[in-house]
Image (tube, rainbow, N blue to C red):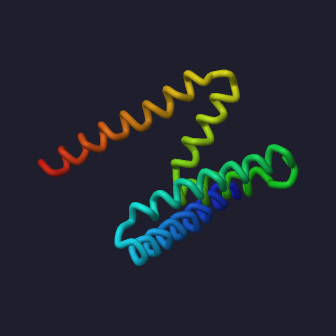
């Protein structure tokens, strides 16, 4: 239950932070494109930082805190960071082809189903 609570609270923090970055982006740039870019890049760095530190100091974070920060905060902030981290792990595990397939497939298929979803939504 503690882990669920940490993930739930972390998700709220991450989502609220993402919303704040979106407001900042619209205010400064007139669009959320740079907010999304900022969230994706910052989230990738922060997830790597959290998991790298947890890897080097496994006892520093309880499982609930680790999940609250990674799945909760970072998941609410951006899932792009998870995709990037998983691709790095695949490449580190001597599976660069699998990492490339994961990244390429996520982008290509993600774009295709977004177009499909837009089409379907516009014709409901």
Task: Point out residue 78 in the picture as x, y percentages from the top left corner.
Answer: 52, 55
Quadrant occupied by the N terminus: bottom right
Q: Residue furthest front?
A: 29
Q: From what the image shows, is residue 21 above or below residue 52?
A: below
Q: What residue lies at 44% left-to-right and 36% top-to-bottom?
A: 106
- Which of 62 and 44 lies nearest the eye of the viewer? 44
Res 46 quadrant in image: bottom right
Q: From what the image shows, is residue 30 above or below residue 3?
A: below
- Which of 27 and 106 lies nearest the eye of the viewer? 27
For this view, does 98 lie left or right of residue 104? Answer: right
Q: Residue furthest left?
A: 123
Res 36 quadrant in image: bottom left
Q: What residue lies at 70% left-to-right and 58% top-to-bottom?
A: 2
Task: Point out residue 109 in the picture as x, y percentages from the top left corner.
Answer: 36, 34
Task: Point out residue 61 in the picture as x, y percentages from the top left corner.
Answer: 81, 54
Task: Point out residue 113 in the picture as x, y percentages from the top left corner.
Answer: 30, 39
Q: From what the image shows, is residue 111 above or below residue 99?
A: below
For this view, does 113 lie left or right of residue 119? Answer: right
Q: What residue lies at 80% left-to-right and 44% top-to-bottom?
A: 55
């Amino acid at each position: 239950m503690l882990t669920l609570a940490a993930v739930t609270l972390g998700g709220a923090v991450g989502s609220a932070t993402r919303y704040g970055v979106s407001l900042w982006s619209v205010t400064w740039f007139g669009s959320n494109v740079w907010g999304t870019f900022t969230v994706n890049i910052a989230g990738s760095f922060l997830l790597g930082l959290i998991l790298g530190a947890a890897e080097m100091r496994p006892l520093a974070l309880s499982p609930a805190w680790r999940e609250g920060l990674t799945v909760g905060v970072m998941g609410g902030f951006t899932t792009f960071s998870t995709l990037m981290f998983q691709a790095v792990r695949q490449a580190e595990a001597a599976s660069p082809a699998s990492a490339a397939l994961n990244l390429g497939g996520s982008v290509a298929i993600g774009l295709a189903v977004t177009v499909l979803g837009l089409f379907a939504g516009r014709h409901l």
